[in-house]
Amino acid sequence: MAQAKINAKMNDASKGKFSRTLSMADRSGRLLESLDQIETRVEALREEASAMEQERECLIEMIQSIRNSQELRSVCDGEREELSLTASRLLGRTLTVSISVDTIRNEQQEEALKKATAIIDEITGKVLEDMEGARKRLQALHAACVTDAPPVPLDQKFQSVVISCALEDQKKIKRRLETLIRNMDNAQKTIQIMDNQKVDHSCLSNGK
Protein backbone atom coordinates (compact mmCIF):
# COMPACT_ATOMS: atom_id res chain seq x y z
CA MET A 1 0.00 0.00 0.00
CA ALA A 2 2.76 2.37 0.94
CA GLN A 3 4.67 1.47 -2.20
CA ALA A 4 1.58 2.16 -4.30
CA LYS A 5 1.29 5.67 -2.82
CA ILE A 6 4.97 6.31 -3.53
CA ASN A 7 4.57 5.18 -7.13
CA ALA A 8 1.49 7.39 -7.54
CA LYS A 9 3.37 10.43 -6.26
CA MET A 10 6.27 9.69 -8.60
CA ASN A 11 3.88 9.46 -11.55
CA ASP A 12 2.24 12.75 -10.60
CA ALA A 13 5.65 14.39 -10.32
CA SER A 14 6.67 13.05 -13.72
CA LYS A 15 3.49 14.35 -15.29
CA GLY A 16 4.04 17.79 -13.73
CA LYS A 17 7.63 17.93 -14.96
CA PHE A 18 6.58 16.87 -18.45
CA SER A 19 3.90 19.59 -18.53
CA ARG A 20 6.39 22.23 -17.44
CA THR A 21 8.81 21.13 -20.16
CA LEU A 22 6.15 21.51 -22.82
CA SER A 23 5.21 24.92 -21.46
CA MET A 24 8.85 26.07 -21.55
CA ALA A 25 9.16 24.83 -25.13
CA ASP A 26 6.03 26.75 -26.09
CA ARG A 27 7.35 29.91 -24.51
CA SER A 28 10.71 29.45 -26.21
CA GLY A 29 8.99 29.00 -29.56
CA ARG A 30 6.88 32.12 -29.10
CA LEU A 31 9.95 34.15 -28.12
CA LEU A 32 11.86 32.86 -31.13
CA GLU A 33 8.96 33.76 -33.40
CA SER A 34 8.85 37.27 -31.92
CA LEU A 35 12.58 37.70 -32.48
CA ASP A 36 12.22 36.56 -36.09
CA GLN A 37 9.52 39.17 -36.63
CA ILE A 38 11.67 41.86 -35.00
CA GLU A 39 14.63 40.90 -37.19
CA THR A 40 12.46 41.35 -40.29
CA ARG A 41 11.40 44.81 -39.07
CA VAL A 42 15.01 45.75 -38.24
CA GLU A 43 16.14 44.89 -41.77
CA ALA A 44 13.19 46.83 -43.19
CA LEU A 45 14.15 49.80 -41.00
CA ARG A 46 17.73 49.72 -42.25
CA GLU A 47 16.56 49.54 -45.87
CA GLU A 48 14.18 52.46 -45.41
CA ALA A 49 16.85 54.52 -43.66
CA SER A 50 19.32 53.72 -46.45
CA ALA A 51 16.75 54.78 -49.04
CA MET A 52 16.22 58.05 -47.16
CA GLU A 53 19.97 58.57 -47.03
CA GLN A 54 20.15 58.15 -50.81
CA GLU A 55 17.21 60.54 -51.28
CA ARG A 56 19.02 63.14 -49.17
CA GLU A 57 22.16 62.79 -51.31
CA CYS A 58 20.07 63.03 -54.48
CA LEU A 59 18.31 66.21 -53.31
CA ILE A 60 21.60 67.86 -52.38
CA GLU A 61 23.06 66.98 -55.77
CA MET A 62 20.00 68.33 -57.59
CA ILE A 63 20.04 71.62 -55.69
CA GLN A 64 23.75 72.12 -56.26
CA SER A 65 23.31 71.29 -59.93
CA ILE A 66 20.66 74.00 -60.26
CA ARG A 67 22.83 76.53 -58.43
CA ASN A 68 25.71 75.86 -60.83
CA SER A 69 23.62 75.47 -63.98
CA GLN A 70 24.01 77.57 -67.07
CA GLU A 71 20.24 78.13 -67.10
CA LEU A 72 20.50 80.04 -63.82
CA ARG A 73 23.14 82.30 -65.34
CA SER A 74 20.96 83.06 -68.33
CA VAL A 75 18.07 84.66 -66.38
CA CYS A 76 17.95 88.30 -65.33
CA ASP A 77 19.71 89.44 -62.17
CA GLY A 78 16.56 89.83 -60.08
CA GLU A 79 15.20 86.38 -60.92
CA ARG A 80 18.64 84.82 -60.51
CA GLU A 81 18.96 86.27 -57.02
CA GLU A 82 15.51 84.98 -56.03
CA LEU A 83 16.20 81.52 -57.44
CA SER A 84 19.58 81.37 -55.73
CA LEU A 85 18.05 82.31 -52.38
CA THR A 86 15.37 79.63 -52.80
CA ALA A 87 18.00 77.03 -53.68
CA SER A 88 20.10 78.02 -50.67
CA ARG A 89 17.07 77.78 -48.40
CA LEU A 90 16.20 74.32 -49.69
CA LEU A 91 19.80 73.18 -49.35
CA GLY A 92 19.90 74.43 -45.77
CA ARG A 93 16.69 72.57 -44.90
CA THR A 94 17.97 69.39 -46.54
CA LEU A 95 21.22 69.55 -44.58
CA THR A 96 19.24 69.69 -41.32
CA VAL A 97 18.16 66.10 -41.97
CA SER A 98 20.70 63.72 -40.44
CA ILE A 99 20.51 60.02 -41.35
CA SER A 100 23.11 57.43 -40.44
CA VAL A 101 23.11 53.71 -41.18
CA ASP A 102 26.27 52.14 -39.75
CA THR A 103 27.72 49.10 -41.47
CA ILE A 104 29.05 46.21 -39.42
CA ARG A 105 32.49 45.25 -40.79
CA ASN A 106 35.22 42.82 -39.93
CA GLU A 107 38.88 43.85 -40.01
CA GLN A 108 39.37 42.79 -43.63
CA GLN A 109 36.30 44.72 -44.80
CA GLU A 110 37.41 47.80 -42.86
CA GLU A 111 40.82 47.72 -44.53
CA ALA A 112 39.29 47.17 -47.98
CA LEU A 113 36.99 50.20 -47.53
CA LYS A 114 39.96 52.39 -46.60
CA LYS A 115 41.84 51.27 -49.73
CA ALA A 116 38.85 51.87 -52.02
CA THR A 117 38.24 55.32 -50.52
CA ALA A 118 41.91 56.24 -50.86
CA ILE A 119 41.94 55.25 -54.55
CA ILE A 120 38.87 57.38 -55.31
CA ASP A 121 40.15 60.33 -53.28
CA GLU A 122 43.47 60.24 -55.14
CA ILE A 123 41.69 60.56 -58.49
CA THR A 124 39.30 63.30 -57.38
CA GLY A 125 42.26 65.27 -56.06
CA LYS A 126 43.64 65.47 -59.61
CA VAL A 127 40.42 66.51 -61.38
CA LEU A 128 41.52 70.12 -61.86
CA GLU A 129 44.83 68.97 -63.38
CA ASP A 130 43.28 66.58 -65.91
CA MET A 131 39.49 66.40 -65.88
CA GLU A 132 39.16 64.06 -68.85
CA GLY A 133 41.82 61.69 -67.55
CA ALA A 134 40.24 61.64 -64.09
CA ARG A 135 36.84 60.99 -65.64
CA LYS A 136 38.15 57.97 -67.56
CA ARG A 137 39.77 56.55 -64.43
CA LEU A 138 36.55 56.99 -62.46
CA GLN A 139 34.65 55.22 -65.24
CA ALA A 140 37.11 52.31 -65.00
CA LEU A 141 36.51 52.15 -61.24
CA HIS A 142 32.75 52.23 -61.75
CA ALA A 143 33.01 49.45 -64.34
CA ALA A 144 34.61 47.32 -61.63
CA CYS A 145 31.48 47.75 -59.49
CA VAL A 146 28.83 46.60 -61.97
CA THR A 147 27.79 43.06 -62.86
CA ASP A 148 26.84 43.77 -66.47
CA ALA A 149 29.50 43.94 -69.15
CA PRO A 150 30.80 47.53 -68.91
CA PRO A 151 31.31 49.65 -72.06
CA VAL A 152 34.75 50.70 -70.80
CA PRO A 153 37.75 48.72 -69.51
CA LEU A 154 37.47 47.97 -65.80
CA ASP A 155 40.12 48.41 -63.13
CA GLN A 156 40.77 44.83 -61.98
CA LYS A 157 42.86 45.91 -59.00
CA PHE A 158 40.05 48.11 -57.75
CA GLN A 159 37.56 45.32 -58.41
CA SER A 160 39.44 42.97 -56.08
CA VAL A 161 39.41 45.67 -53.40
CA VAL A 162 35.68 46.34 -53.75
CA ILE A 163 34.82 42.63 -53.60
CA SER A 164 36.52 42.50 -50.21
CA CYS A 165 34.26 45.29 -48.89
CA ALA A 166 30.99 44.75 -47.06
CA LEU A 167 27.96 44.55 -49.36
CA GLU A 168 26.51 47.86 -48.12
CA ASP A 169 29.88 49.55 -48.68
CA GLN A 170 30.02 48.16 -52.22
CA LYS A 171 26.70 49.85 -52.98
CA LYS A 172 27.85 53.15 -51.46
CA ILE A 173 31.12 53.08 -53.42
CA LYS A 174 29.19 52.50 -56.65
CA ARG A 175 26.80 55.40 -55.88
CA ARG A 176 29.68 57.72 -55.04
CA LEU A 177 31.41 56.96 -58.34
CA GLU A 178 28.16 57.53 -60.25
CA THR A 179 27.71 60.90 -58.55
CA LEU A 180 31.30 61.97 -59.26
CA ILE A 181 31.06 60.98 -62.93
CA ARG A 182 27.71 62.74 -63.31
CA ASN A 183 29.06 65.92 -61.69
CA MET A 184 32.08 65.89 -63.97
CA ASP A 185 29.85 65.43 -67.03
CA ASN A 186 27.76 68.43 -65.94
CA ALA A 187 30.90 70.48 -65.33
CA GLN A 188 32.23 69.65 -68.79
CA LYS A 189 28.93 70.63 -70.39
CA THR A 190 28.99 73.96 -68.56
CA ILE A 191 32.57 74.61 -69.69
CA GLN A 192 31.65 73.80 -73.29
CA ILE A 193 28.64 76.14 -73.20
CA MET A 194 30.78 78.94 -71.78
CA ASP A 195 33.46 78.35 -74.43
CA ASN A 196 30.84 78.46 -77.18
CA GLN A 197 29.45 81.70 -75.79
CA LYS A 198 32.94 83.20 -75.83
CA VAL A 199 33.36 82.15 -79.46
CA ASP A 200 29.97 83.60 -80.42
CA HIS A 201 30.74 86.83 -78.60
CA SER A 202 34.12 87.05 -80.34
CA CYS A 203 32.48 86.53 -83.75
CA LEU A 204 29.91 89.22 -83.06
CA SER A 205 32.61 91.62 -81.94
CA ASN A 206 34.52 91.03 -85.17
CA GLY A 207 31.36 91.46 -87.24
CA LYS A 208 31.32 87.88 -88.49
Image (cartoon, rainbow, N blue to C red):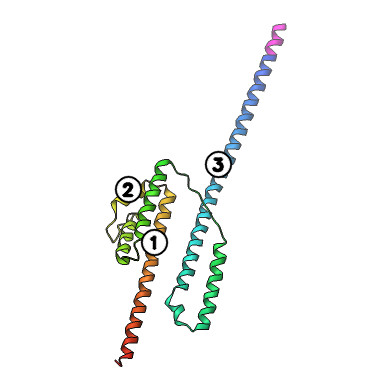
- In the picture of the structure, the residue carrying the numbered disc 1 is 178
Q: Residue at x 55, y 47 (%)?
A: 42
Q: Disc 2 marks which amino acid?
A: Ser
Relative height, residue 22 to residue 188 (above, below): above
Image quadrant holding the C terminus, namely bottom left
Asked whether residue 103 appears in the rendered view, the answer is yes
Cα distance, mark 3 to mark 2? 34 Å
Cα distance, mark 3 to mark 1? 36 Å
Q: Secondary structure at mark 1?
A: helix
Q: Nearest the camera: 44 or 27?
A: 44
Instruction: Reply yes or no: does residue 142 show up in magenta.
Output: no
- In the picture of the structure, the residue carrying the numbered disc 2 is 160
In the image, which is nearer the foreground, mark 3 or mark 2? 2
Q: Residue at x 38, y 70 (%)?
A: 187
Magenta stretch prevailing secondary structure? helix
Q: Quadrant of residue 179?
A: bottom left
In the image, which is nearer the foreground, mark 3 or mark 1? 1
Q: Residue at x 39, y 53 (%)?
A: 117
Going from N to C along the chain, the mark reached first, 1 or 2, is: 2
Residue 101 picture location, percent across and down:
51, 51
Q: Disc 1 marks which amino acid?
A: Glu
Going from N to C along the chain, the mark reached first, 3 or 1, is: 3
Where are the magenta residues, as a range?
1-8
Residue 167 picture location, percent across and down:
42, 48
Q: Disc 3 marks which amino acid?
A: Asp
Label of residue 36 in the image: 3
